[in-house]
Image (cartoon, rainbow, N blue to C red):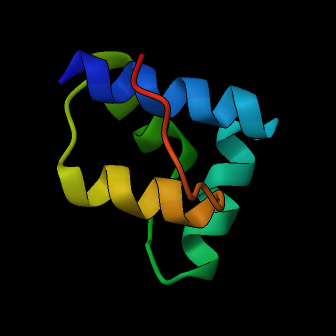
């Protein structure tokens, strides 16, 4: 699942969003996460597909570049 973490980190960088901003956006769409938890999930690379999709939705990603 490290690929998913790298994908999300790249999208955050591309969007110019910080972990703090991601958490704010997640909270705005009803996903209760803390910044420390998001950091840990991304550093470990262990999180569900649901979290990945929620994060991508929260930062407004509409397309992904896998290669």
Left or right: 27, with 18 as reference point: left
Front residue (pair 39, 66): 66
Q: Which of the 4 quarters of the picture holds residue 16?
A: top right
- The image quarter containing residue 62 is bottom right
Residue at (58%, 24%) from the top-left corner? 10
> Quadrant where the C terminus lies?
top left
Residue furthest toward the right? 16
Q: Position of residue 14 (x, y in %)?
A: 73, 30
In front of the other: 14 or 19: 14
Query: How far across and how far down the image is residue 11, in percent?
Result: 60, 34
Looking at the rendered structure, the number of numbered marks drawn on it comes to 0
In the rendered view of the protein, which quadrant contains the N terminus?
Answer: top left
Q: Is residue 49 left or right of residue 33?
A: left
Residue at position x 71%, y 46% from top? 20
Left or right relative to 30: residue 13: right
- Is 46 placed above or below 23 here? above
Residue 2 in the image, given as x and y percentages of width and height: 25, 17
Q: Is residue 28 left or right of residue 5?
A: right
Above or below residue 28? Residue 15 is: above
Observer-nearest residue: 44 or 51?
51
- Give the residue at x 59% y 54%: 61
Q: Position of residue 33 (x, y in %)?
A: 45, 60
């Amino acid at each position: 699942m490290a690929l998913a973490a790298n994908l999300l980190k790249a999208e955050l960088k591309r969007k110019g969003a910080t972990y703090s901003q991601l958490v704010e956006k997640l909270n705005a769409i009803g996903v209760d996460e803390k910044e420390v938890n998001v950091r840990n999930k991304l550093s470990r690379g262990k999180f569900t597909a649901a979290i990945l999709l929620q994060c991508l939705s929260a930062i407004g990603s509409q397309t992904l570049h896998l290669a």
